[in-house]
């Protein structure tokens, strides 16, 4: 998982509150910063067309107003939901599932509670 964190300059002197968010296209879509990595992992099929290309960089900037948060003294931390758990079923072998609950050692309702 790649976690993108923006912190206000004031965080150098004191702790700053941070908004923690999931995003659904990749970190690169929340801000046009060319240093943000484009995801290499799973992208849902409806998002594939043009979604992992430079032309989509910053496409959802209005939904994640990092500059406004920073100006108010807040930080922003976000990660791509597809890095946590890609949106397709493969018997819980993708994403974080194998790290938290090894296959064969899970009750049938472990992820529905």
Image (cartoon, rainbow, N blue to C red):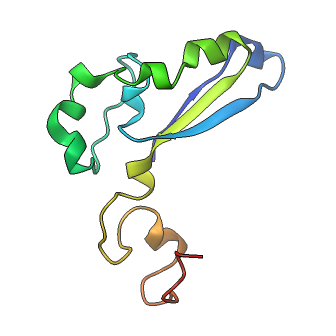
Residue in the picture at 41% in, 59% down: 85
Specify the quadrant that holds the C terminus. bottom right
Relative to 26, does residue 107 appear above or below in the rendering?
Answer: below
Tally the numbered discs.
Answer: 0
Q: Is residue 52 visible?
A: no
Q: Residue furthest left?
A: 49
Of residues 72 and 93, the one nearer the viewer is 72
Is 53 displayed left or right of 85 in the figure?
left
User: Residue 102, image x and y in percent?
Assistant: 47, 80
Please say whether residue 109 is visible from this viewpoint. yes
* Residue that extends furthest to the right in the rendered view of this protein: 14
Residue in the picture at 38% in, 74% down: 92
Determine whether 24 is above or below 66 in the image.
below
Q: For the point 68% across and 16% down, which residue is it?
A: 8
Q: Position of residue 69 (x, y in %)?
A: 65, 18
Q: Position of residue 106 (x, y in %)?
A: 50, 86
Tell which of 49 and 35 is nearer to you.
Answer: 49
Q: In this rendering, is residue 53 above or below 24? A: above
Q: Give the residue at x 28% y 51%.
A: 42
């Amino acid at each position: 998982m790649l976690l993108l964190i923006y912190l206000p300059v004031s965080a150098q002197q004191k702790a700053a509150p941070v908004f923690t968010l999931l995003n659904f296209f990749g970190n690169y879509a929340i801000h046009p910063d060319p240093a943000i990595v484009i995801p290499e992992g799973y992208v849902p099929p409806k998002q594939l067309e043009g979604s992992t290309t430079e032309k989509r960089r910053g496409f959802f900037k209005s939904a994640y107003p990092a500059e406004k948060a920073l100006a108010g003294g807040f930080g922003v931390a976000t990660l791509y939901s597809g890095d946590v758990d890609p949106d397709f079923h493969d018997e819980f072998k993708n994403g974080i599932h194998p790290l938290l609950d090894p296959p064969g050692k899970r009750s049938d309702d472990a992820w529905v509670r």
